[in-house]
Image: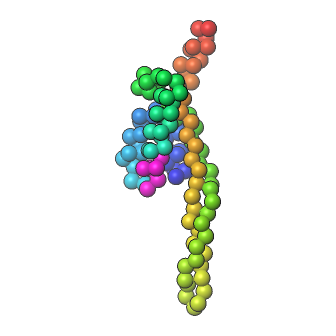
Amino acid sequence: MRLLADLIRGKGVYEALNILKFNAKEASGRLEKLLTSAISNYEAKTGERPENSNLIVQQVFVDSAIQMKRLRTAPQGRANRIRKRSNHVTIVVDKKAIETKKEEATK
C-alpha cells in the first residue's frame, strides 16, 4: 500500500486515478476507490467541479492498524503465527499551491 501511496503523492487526481487503474497490485483497487471518494467529498464541500479546480493529491499516509493473529500448523507438531495485517489510509486532496499563492498575492 505504501508503494502505491508514494506513486500518487503530488500528482494530479486524474493522473493518480490512471496510475492506480492500470497498476497490477492488489491495493491499487482500494486506493482508487478511496481517491474517487476524496474527489467527490471535495466536490460536495466546495461546490466546485473537480475538473476545473486543478486538484492534486497533496498528502497520502498509510498507518498500521490492528493485526489479526492466526496459527498455522508447522512440522513436528509446532505452530507458526500468521499475522494478517491491515492499515489506515488518509488522502488529502487540494488545489495546486501555485494557484493559492497567486490568489493571496492579488488580495
Q: Is residue 64 left or right of residue 27?
A: right
In the image, residue 72 lies at what x, y percent?
A: 55, 79
Residue at (46, 33) in percent of width and height: 40
Q: Is residue 2 left or right of residue 21?
A: right
In the image, residue 2 lies at what x, y percent?
A: 55, 50
Q: Is residue 76 above or below residue 46?
A: below
Q: Is residue 29 above or below residue 97?
A: below
Residue at far bottom of view:
76
Q: Is residue 4 left or right of residue 66?
A: left
Residue at (58, 73) in percent of width and height: 70
Q: Is residue 42 above or below residue 23?
A: above
Which segment did they paint magenta?
26-31
Residue at (61, 70) in percent of width and height: 69
Is 79 in the magenta? no
In the image, residue 107 lies at what x, y percent?
A: 62, 8
In the image, residue 39 lies at what x, y percent?
A: 47, 34
Residue at (50, 33) in percent of width and height: 41
Residue at far top of view:
107
Q: Is residue 40 above or below residue 23?
A: above
